[in-house]
Amino acid sequence: NAGVTQTPKFQVLKTGQSMTLQCAQDMNHEYMSWYRQDPGMGLRLIHYSVGAGITDQGEVPNGYNVSRSTTEDFPLRLLSAAPSQTSVYFCASSYYPGGSQETQYFGPGTRLLVL
Amino acid sequence: EDQVTQSPEALRLQEGESSSLNCSYTVSGLRGLFWYRQDPGKGPEFLFTLYSAGEEKEKERLKATLTKKESFLHITAPKPEDSATYLCAVQSENTGGFKTIFGAGTRLFVKA
């Protein structure tokens, strides 16, 4: 198993540009989520999904869109990038929160710089 | 509001010098408390899940404990390879476990 994969590893954007951060998992996990990590603030939940076709907002959803058309993929879209979105983005997945296996498996991260 | 506070922010130890990391939490009905390890430039890696006060779990030189208000990650005789950031996180019953709240982490440096 490849686990959780993320692309790209690093991206530089100009203010106002759009882009999609890709996330895929091959563990047949129902739950997937996106976090951003900023210095001194820990990981903050952006959006999450409990299955294909079902998404919901996390702690910091503004400026981000998500969709879940398949179990494997959970892309994160920035419609109009802002410097405040400069961060490291992590995708994570787990079998299903509340079940016996709630451990989240994290991807390697995408480092985004918005100029 | 669910909240997680970790202390200290950074900890420097000599190899073999045992110590503890603290995670204080406020949550409406604890569903689970998690410890992760994060190496520079990588994603967090799962270490432990604790579900109820009094529970303890061990893995090599690490031992995690849980009370009703806080969790400790005890590191016994650490080695330089234990250097990393350790993250604490909680899930609450209020959110059905769907939202995980993370602390800012403790950066551990172990010198040989």
Image (tube, coloured by chain):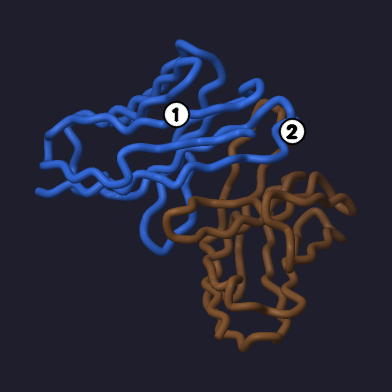
Chain colours: A brown, B blue
Q: Residue at x 50, y 13 (%)?
A: B53
User: What element does badge 2 sit on?
Assistant: helix
Q: Depth check: give the residue in front, B77 or A35.
A: A35
- Where residue B112 is drawn, which disc sits there? none
Task: Indicate left or right for B38 with B95 as reference.
Answer: left
Disc 2 marks which amino acid? Thr
Question: Which quadrant of the view contains residue A68?
Answer: bottom right
Q: Residue at x 37, y 26 (%)?
A: B72
Query: Number of callouts in the render?
Result: 2
Residue furthest front in the image: B1
Q: Residue at x 21, y 29 (%)?
A: B76
**Label 2 chain ID:** B
On the same chain: label 2 and label 1?
Answer: yes
Question: Which quadrant of the view contains residue B63?
Answer: top left
Give neighbour class at mark 2: few <14, some 14-19, many 20+ (Cα, 10 Å): few
In the displayed structure, would residue A15 be above or below residue B15? below
Q: Are marks 2 and 1 in contact (CB under 8 Å)?
A: no
Q: Can you give x and y, in whole percent of width and height, for residue B20 in the image?
A: 27, 29
